[in-house]
Image: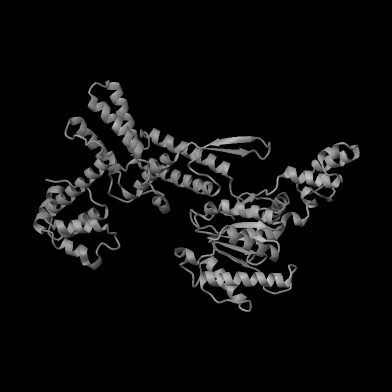
Amino acid sequence: MLGFDPYKVLTYKDKDLREAVALEKAKVGTVQEALSDPQKSEIFYQYMELPMAGWTDESGKYCKGIEDYLPNAQYETREYRALVIEDILENWVTLSRGGKFHAILATSSIPEAVEYYRILKEKAPDLKVTALFDPSIDNNGGAKWKEDGLVEIITDYNEQYGQDFTIPTFARMKKDIAARLAHKKPYERIDRAPELQINLLIVVDQMLTGFDSKWINTLYLDKMLQYENIIQAFSRTNRLFGPDKPFGTIKYYRRPHTMEKNIEAAVKLYSGDRPFGLFVQRLDKNLEKMNAIYAEIKDLFEQAGVDSFRQLPEDVTERRKFANLFREFNEYLEAAKIQGFIWKRDSYVFTDAETGKPFTVQVEIDERSYKVLALRYKELFSGSDGDSTGDIPYDVAGYLTIIDTEKIDTDYMNSRFVKYLKLFQLGTASEEALRQAEDELHKTFATLSQEEQKYANIFLHNIQCGDVIPEEGKLLRDYIIEYISKAKEDQIHHLSSALGLDEYQLRGMMSLHVTEANINEFGRFDALKATVDKKKAREYFEWLEGTKIIPPKVPVKTDKLLRDFILSGGFEIRMP
């Protein structure tokens, strides 16, 4: 699977181009003039009804389309190039994934490449752009014009990256450009140094064949290609690279309808007329798949008796199913984001390729629900749903656990808390009104982790029992954090008492948030274990297991309990 996502970009309206060609062929200046003469009117409408791209009839004869009548000059104006650049810049952040990936702009000639370079310098001075073409002076763009452009490009490159290339050493500059784009020696860690990167490379013919980099994810084409040249050029983007690059994006501008036909012909030749899997699904299909998978996830939780995604299902098989569905959902979501999906829009209008009629896809999931699901997914790894023992038997994708769930909106949850509190303190609210307000508040708890939900419910119960009088202006999350902090303090104290160890040292280790790899760095874990009162530890484990324990087993059990406690961030232990 190559993973191409090609887009035909129209810089001119088809209607305007048809009309311009039809008027020229009818040898008139206006539509009114064409309609006033029957002979000219017939010619005018003959061209107005032509397809935009040419085609081959049943006899094998090629029939011209509107784009065949357009002069090359149509695509050589500054206004046209400004439109191409406008499209590139408008979608730059989305397609480059915030500058993580690089792109190539392929042009039709050296003068065009230089012109694009100069316009981009003017329109996007912060974008790091350079150009690459054959430095030999014999070209159709004029030797002096090309040499001046080349000197300008090399000078700018030297200033940008602290180099000293010249026209005679341009071959070295090409190698330097290739190394930067591929993140190869000496630029293996260039992803951490954006100032050393090239955002966009402008080319004519070079780098469209042979060059290979997983860091290139977009190809902008302002030139006509055919057959193997299309596949080779497209393949500059097809090396997949994690969730941020599920496919390569191609955008083509020059004679777009003809290029579309050329792509179809190239695919037919390349794939043996079996293009399935060669091109990725479009946005409408990805949104529809997102809706379908979200419906499955909702049904899964509802069937498990869990409302509002407030916790993971209890059954292991249901958790495993959720892990698979959520991972699959994210594959479609990442593709949709590259294709233009944003959370702020919940409705997208498309045009049916066969009927030409518009249709709408309504996105069923909102960002808040997605982040709640992401929080539940994280809990498959962390065991924060209350089960901190055993391994996670799920087919999970690690990168999904870094989804930012910290920004789930807490304002709504706090507004429900304030509403419930007012009704509760009023004393005259009906049981139905109070129950409804409490239900609304409980539904917002889905945005909390399982541990946070536990203490939110304890806090709410304490209010209802009169054990706590809420302070005016204090947020619900503030109370939750206080309760969790107090619980952590108690957990550390209980473990220290049970094992007779140095509580101060244990608190210090907990504050470091150590991992399995560095828990004993500088011998700190061994030092902590050395403070354990072996007699107290033995008495604790004998009480816990209800049986006598031989002394050699006590250090082993102590190590396991203490290690699990520290690495998990603490948990309640049973106390005598």
Residue 68, horizontal then vertical, whole percent: 79, 52
Give left or right: position of 316 versus 89. left
Q: Name the image quarter holding the N terminus.
A: bottom right
Residue 77, horizontal then vertical, whole percent: 71, 56
Image position of 203 with respect to 460: above or below: below
Q: Residue furthest bottom?
A: 168
Residue found at x 67% / y 71% = 148
Q: Name the image quarter holding the C terminus.
A: top left
Total marks in image: 0
Residue 563: tell me if it is visible.
no
Q: How is the image coloured?
A: one colour
Q: Quadrant of residue 325?
A: top left
**Front position in the image: 317 or 266:** 266
Residue found at x 41% / y 36% = 300
**Front position in the image: 212 or 216:** 216
Give left or right: position of 545 versus 163. left
**Front position in the image: 222 or 541:** 222
Image position of 148 with respect to 32: above or below: below
Residue 81, horizontal then vertical, whole percent: 67, 56
Give left or right: position of 333 versus 304. right
Residue 300: tell me if it is visible.
yes
Q: Quadrant of residue 466?
A: top left
**Front position in the image: 24 or 533:** 24
Residue found at x 22% / y 48% = 571
Q: Residue furthest left?
A: 535
Residue 244, horizontal then vertical, whole percent: 49, 54
Residue found at x 31% / y 28% = 437
Give left or right: position of 30 versus 326. right
